[in-house]
Amino acid sequence: MSPDKRKTKRQRGSSLTAQPPPRAANRIFYAVAEGAVTEYDYLTMLQNAFSEQCSFRIDMPRSRPDDMKPWRVAERVLAVAEEDARRPEGEQYAEIWALFDRDRHRDVAEALDALDGHSKVRVAFSNPSFDFWLYLHYALHDVPQDGWNHQIHQLLAQSPGFLGFGAKDKRITKARADNLLPRIKMTCDHARSLDKRCRSGKCAHRRGTKPDCGPLDQDPSTGMWRLLESLGIA
């Protein structure tokens, strides 16, 4: 393979490069994610595209262990919140976000309980996974997944720009970002509609049939729209 072809192949599979955020953002957020790649690539995409017009900045950990469990995400978020509380009021984060998934994890309920009640801590919980949020950019889907990602990956791989997406290809490249960004509003509408069904008592989830059914009952669902709402994007 020629050097030019190798370079082209590498660029196609590369994560987005973070652009400098606004020097004086009105609101500064912090986010810790379960995965080491996809979620942070997506946050980078949001920051590159919207941070200036919405005047925000998202700080993220420099060290990003792959496939952290929900409880580990909760621990890191709580540590950030504790440190943040010691800062002068004008230097504190607006909100601190935890992004984690249902998958087949056994510690989701404990992680959610640990984060509940903290004034600045917010949770973007996705069931079965963050990849479900990605698929909502293309279509509404309400078939229960029982913590498995196989069907979501199949559907996503048929969507524009996501051919080959899966366990070995989890990056949000520029090409994928170009497909996702124009669909942001529709995505939030899809995710909100699933949430509204639960709160109205008309939940379509197999096990969630009450307005107060919990996030583990809401299958599939994702709270990522709440983060975009906080950022001022949605």
Image (spheres, grey):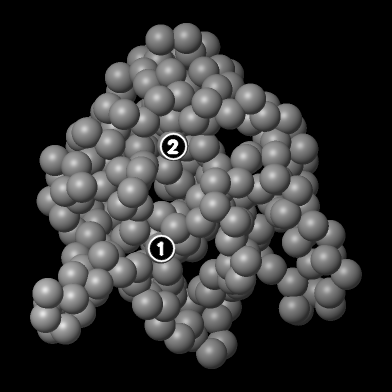
Percent position of residue 151, x then y: 27, 27
Q: CA distance from mark 1 to mark 2?
A: 15 Å
Percent position of residue 102, x then y: 52, 31
Q: Quick check: 52 left or right of 33? A: left
Residue at x 41% of width, y 10% of height: 206
- Residue 230 seen in the figure: yes
Q: Identify the residue at the far front of this view.
A: 1
Residue that numbered label 1 is attached to: 41
Residue at x 53% of width, y 74% of height: 57
Residue that numbered label 2 is attached to: 129
Mark 2: few/some/many CA within 10 Å (<14, 14-19, 20+): many
Image vertical order of residue 94 relative to residue 88, above or below? above
- Residue 196 seen in the figure: no
Secondary element under disc 1, as helix, strand or loop, is: helix
Q: Earlier in the sequence, mark 1 or mark 2?
A: 1
Mark 1: few/some/many CA within 10 Å (<14, 14-19, 20+): many
Camera-side residue of 188 and 46: 46
Secondary element under disc 2, as helix, strand or loop, is: loop
Image vertical order of residue 142 relative to residue 3, above or below? above
- The C terminus sits in image quarter: bottom left
